[in-house]
Structure formats: C-alpha cells, structure tokens
Image (cartoon, rainbow, N blue to C red):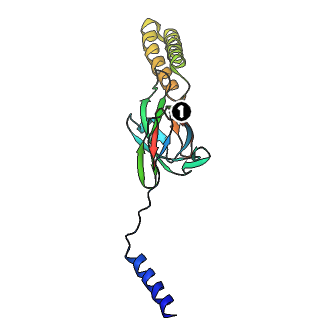
C-alpha cells in the first residue's frame, strides 16, 4: 500500500514540476479569391467621410476553409474608405468605395488586401443642369413681361437662383447605415493563427 501511495505522490510531484507545454495553433492560409461578407457597425455618411477614414464592421458569416471555420462569424473587421466623392448640385452622384483593411482573430489583427465595395447615388448632374437652365429661362420670360429688357436680366438671375435651390433640395446625400452587408473578396493570401 505504501509503495502505491509513494509512487502516486512522486508522479504528481514530477508532473507539477515539469514545465508547462505551450499550446500553439497551426498557421492557416486563406487563399486569394476567398469571398466573405461584412456587416457595417456604424453609419457611413458621404458628408462627413474622407478617403482614408476607418470604420468598424464584423464578419457576417465565418470564413471557412475545407469545411473548417478559420475566422468565426462576428470577428471584428476594420473598413477603410478608399475613395469618397460628393456629388453636389452640378456634378453627378455621391460615391463611397470601401475595402477591408484588417480582420481581427483571437485578439490579433491581420492586414488584408480586398476588392472594393462601392455605394453611390444615382447621378443628378444632367438633371440639375436642366433644372437650372429651365429656371433661368422662365425667370427671363417673366422678367421680360414685367419690365422689358432690364426686367428680363433681373428675372434670369432670379430664375438661376430658383433653379439652383430646386436642385439642391432634390436628392439626399449618400448614407450607408449601420448593419449594411457588403461583399468582399481577398486579392492576396492571408495567413492567420
């Protein structure tokens, strides 16, 4: 009895003094061409966004490889605005192009190179010009009837202002709300642990 108890105590002491083995996870390569979806975590407004601005998001679905989850759903993602254009009254549509800057897994951030996700409003440039010219012409006609040549000039200026105001209120600026799903594709391999 004493021998068995002595051996058990010796084994416990040996195991407790042995150095702890460190667990290391194998590195996995996610290949270029892998598609994934990101859900935005905050509002992206063209009026307050500049190229280079960063935004938060999460993976909408896990990134898989050979049927195994490599990066889980809900992992944090950092988006970056690569191009931002405000349409304004006289030039086309608002535009925001986003790409994924990095994906976070296990507290570690992995930089990635991805395709672009583009959001834009329908172009209003030609319609705006038409509205402005129509407003100018109508103002000139009304001014001409009311006060001759001088009235036509004043009416044209009033019509120009009226046409510009009309177009300015026509279409809201681009806003990408939180919870918007955007599709991306890896353009180069990414190694994660």
> Residue at coordinates 53% horizontally, 22% vertically from top-left?
124
Q: Camera-side residue: 9 or 88?
A: 9
Q: Could you tell me which secondary element the residue under label 1 belongs to?
A: loop
Considering only vertical position in the picture, is 119 above or below 129?
below
Q: Quadrant of residue 154?
A: top left
Q: Camera-side residue: 6 or 75?
A: 6
Location of residue 147 in the rendering, given as x and y in whole percent from the top left corner: 47, 10
Q: Camera-side residue: 46 or 180?
A: 180
Considering only vertical position in the picture, is 119 above or below 139?
below
Location of residue 134 in the rendering, given as x and y in whole percent from the top left corner: 54, 14
Q: Residue furthest bottom?
A: 2
> Residue at coordinates 53% horizontally, 16% vertically from top-left?
126
Identify the residue position indicated by label 1 in the image. Answer: 33
- The 10 Å Cα crowd at callout 1, few under 14, some 14 to 19, many 20 or more, is some
Q: Residue furthest right?
A: 67
Q: Quadrant of residue 113?
A: top left
Number of marks drawn: 1
Location of residue 68 in the rendering, given as x and y in whole percent from the top left corner: 59, 49
Q: Camera-side residue: 153 or 166?
A: 166
Location of residue 95 in the rendering, given as x and y in whole percent from the top left corner: 48, 29
Q: Residue furthest top?
A: 149
Considering only vertical position in the picture, is 112 above or below 141?
below
């Amino acid at each position: 009895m004493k021998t068995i108890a002595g051996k058990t105590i010796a084994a416990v002491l040996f195991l407790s003094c042995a150095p702890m083995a460190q667990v290391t996870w194998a590195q996995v390569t996610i290949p270029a061409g892998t598609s994934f979806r990101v859900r935005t975590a905050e509002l992206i407004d063209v009026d307050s966004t500049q190229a280079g601005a960063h935004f938060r998001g999460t993976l909408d679905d896990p990134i898989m490889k050979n049927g195994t989850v490599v990066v889980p759903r809900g992992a944090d993602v950092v988006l970056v605005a690569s191009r931002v254009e405000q349409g304004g009254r006289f030039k086309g549509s608002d535009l925001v192009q986003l790409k994924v800057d990095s994906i976070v897994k296990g507290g570690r951030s992995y930089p990635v190179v991805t395709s672009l996700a583009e959001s834009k409003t329908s172009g209003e440039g030609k319609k705006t010009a038409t509205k402005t010219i129509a407003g100018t012409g109508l103002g000139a006609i009304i001014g001409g009837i009311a006060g001759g040549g001088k009235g036509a000039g004043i009416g044209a200026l009033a019509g120009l202002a009226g046409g510009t105001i009309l177009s300015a209120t026509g279409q809201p600026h681009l806003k990408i709300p939180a919870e918007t799903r955007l599709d991306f594709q890896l353009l180069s391999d990414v190694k994660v642990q």
